[in-house]
Image (spheres, helix red, strand yellow):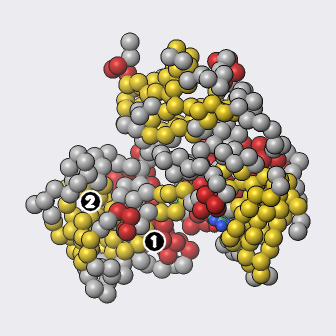
């Protein structure tokens, strides 16, 4: 059993960036990926727009991933592909990993783990659509996989449920492949995807977006023949009497992503109800000493550039990890925030330069993020606008706030109209 300093699980953009940064920090690193190629979900994202922040370049998903794959290959990092991590255990201060591949079961050990297992898509079952279960109901990611990696055409006439980014991107992609996208239906009163994707993927192609509407029933025996659309009320409940039938052969679901954290949970990692990813500190270390999380496994990021950023931090901290007492302070995110990451600070380690990620609960034109320590405002940052689909990031030096374990630190978003 070869001992590593750091084992990174997941070879998507998060795992690649974490492995590179851990190796650059002097660690012996092993990277494990269940698929036969590195790159994660980016392999199937063949449109451009990736890397504007990180590289100042407009790259496709595979091009973005390749830059990091090249960095991994240029270093002394052991890479296992087609290797699925089935079990992780704590073992005398370190960790033992059981993974399955063509050679059988491989057992590896490490001082620290980085969990970079990405996220998965919500399915029809999770959004409670009634009716039959014919062929032709796909998640947007599955439709993207069929179209971009397998060269198959999954739809001729389709309805897209949910205005998340993958659904918007697939609306354009399927249109370019000759399919008719009859409409994107969103249950919320505001779109879920990035503004740039609404323009570039829907409006530029004349694809209609219907807000406060959802799919309530699927029709068809062997293949989808149509769907029932209903208006929804403020609580997102279908309104009786508003049903309309739309004939189509495909229903594509873009109804949200959930961080993939079975391995984390098995290790006793605590998950956050809001992000569905691990609760972590400013090092991106979870409540389990030596277990770090990053990328979409930690929280669903809007841009891959941020995935690489937080993964590089996690990788570096995993490389430098030595068991030492933590002095944890919980950060309180007011209900005006959809979420805040990290959720805690380790006052023994996170005193300088802590990178935070947050989203506003509501779309706001003009607002401030305010941070209060024991009721006193210690920081106010103005934003021209805040939108729930667009994640915000800031780096803070908490040392200047003079915090102790007993401090109460609250984050709140205050709309411009309510500011004094
Ligand atoms: C279906 C889908 C489509 C997307 N399309 C777009 C898009 O068009 N544009 C955009 O900007 N963003 C898109 N995203 C977001 C994009 O995925 C992220 O920005 C980025 O890929 C997240 O990186 P990651 O490394 O955290 O996760 P991923 O890219 O998902 O990588 C996680 C990796 O971990 C591996 N893994 C998981 N569990 C195990 C295990 N037990 N053992 C070994 N390996 C494991 C997986 O195989 C995968 O390769 C999409 C996301 C999804 C889910």
- The location of residue 177, given as percent across then percent down, is 42, 72
Q: Is residue 358 above or below residue 131?
A: above
Q: Residue at x 67, y 57 (%)?
A: 267
Tell me if I can see residue 308 in this picture: no
Q: Residue at x 55, y 23 (%)?
A: 408
Task: Tell me the tag on residue 143.
Answer: 1
Image side of residue 367 versus residue 264, left or right: left
Tell me the quarter of the image containing the C terminus: top left
- The location of residue 222, given as percent across then percent down, is 31, 87
Tell me if I can see residue 250 in this picture: yes
Residue furthest to the left in view is 241
Disc 2 designates what residue? 214
Q: Which element is circle 2 on?
A: strand
Q: Cβ–Cβ below 8 Å for labels 1 and 2?
A: no
- The location of residue 131, given as percent across then percent down, is 26, 75
Residue 334: quarter of image = top left
Circle 1 crowding by C-alpha within 10 Å: few under 14, some 14–19, many from 20:
many
- The location of residue 83, given as percent across then percent down, is 72, 73
Q: Is residue 202 above or below residue 228?
A: above
């Amino acid at each position: 059993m070869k001992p590593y300093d750091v084992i990174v699980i997941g070879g998507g953009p998060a795992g690649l960036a974490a492995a590179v940064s851990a190796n650059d920090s002097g660690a012996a690193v092993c990277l494990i990926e269940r698929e036969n190629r590195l790159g994660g979900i980016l392999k199937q994202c063949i449109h451009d727009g990736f890397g504007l922040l990180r590289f100042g370049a407009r790259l496709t998903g595979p091009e973005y991933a390749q830059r990091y794959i090249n960095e991994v290959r240029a270093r002394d990092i052991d890479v296992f592909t087609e290797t699925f991590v089935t079990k992780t255990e704590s073992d005398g201060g370190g960790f033992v990993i059981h993974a399955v591949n063509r050679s059988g079961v491989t057992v590896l050990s490490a001082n620290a783990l980085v969990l970079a297992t990405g996220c998965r898509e919500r399915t029809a079952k999770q959004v409670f659509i009634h009716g039959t279960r014919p062929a032709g109901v796909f998640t947007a990611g599955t439709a993207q996989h069929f179209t971009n990696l397998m060269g198959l055409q999954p739809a001729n006439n389709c309805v897209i449920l949910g205005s998340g980014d993958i659904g918007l991107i697939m609306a354009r992609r399927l249109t370019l492949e000759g399919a008719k996208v009859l409409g994107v239906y969103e249950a919320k009163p505001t779109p879920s995807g990035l503004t740039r994707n609404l323009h570039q993927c829907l409006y530029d192609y004349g694809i209609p977006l219907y807000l406060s509407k959802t799919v309530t029933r699927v029709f068809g025996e062997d293949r989808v023949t149509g769907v029932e659309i209903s208006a929804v009320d403020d609580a997102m409940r279908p309104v009786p009497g508003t049903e309309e039938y739309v004939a189509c052969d495909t229903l594509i679901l873009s109804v949200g992503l959930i961080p993939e954290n079975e391995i984390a949970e098995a290790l006793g990692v605590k998950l956050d109800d809001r992000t569905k990813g691990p609760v972590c500190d400013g090092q991106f270390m979870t409540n389990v000493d030596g277990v770090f999380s990053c990328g979409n496994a930690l929280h669903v990021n809007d841009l891959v550039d941020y995935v690489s950023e937080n993964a590089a931090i996690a990788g570096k901290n995993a490389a430098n990890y030595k068991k030492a007492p933590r002095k944890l302070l919980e950060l309180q995110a007011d209900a005006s925030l959809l979420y805040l990451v990290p959720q805690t600070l380790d006052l023994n380690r996170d005193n300088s330069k802590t990178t935070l990620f947050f989203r506003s609960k509501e779309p706001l034109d003009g607002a401030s993020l305010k941070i209060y320590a024991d009721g006193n405002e210690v920081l106010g940052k103005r934003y021209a606008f805040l939108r729930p689909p667009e994640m915000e990031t800031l780096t803070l030096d908490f040392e200047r706030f003079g915090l102790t374990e007993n401090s109460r630190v609250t984050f709140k978003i205050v709309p411009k109209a309510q500011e004094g």
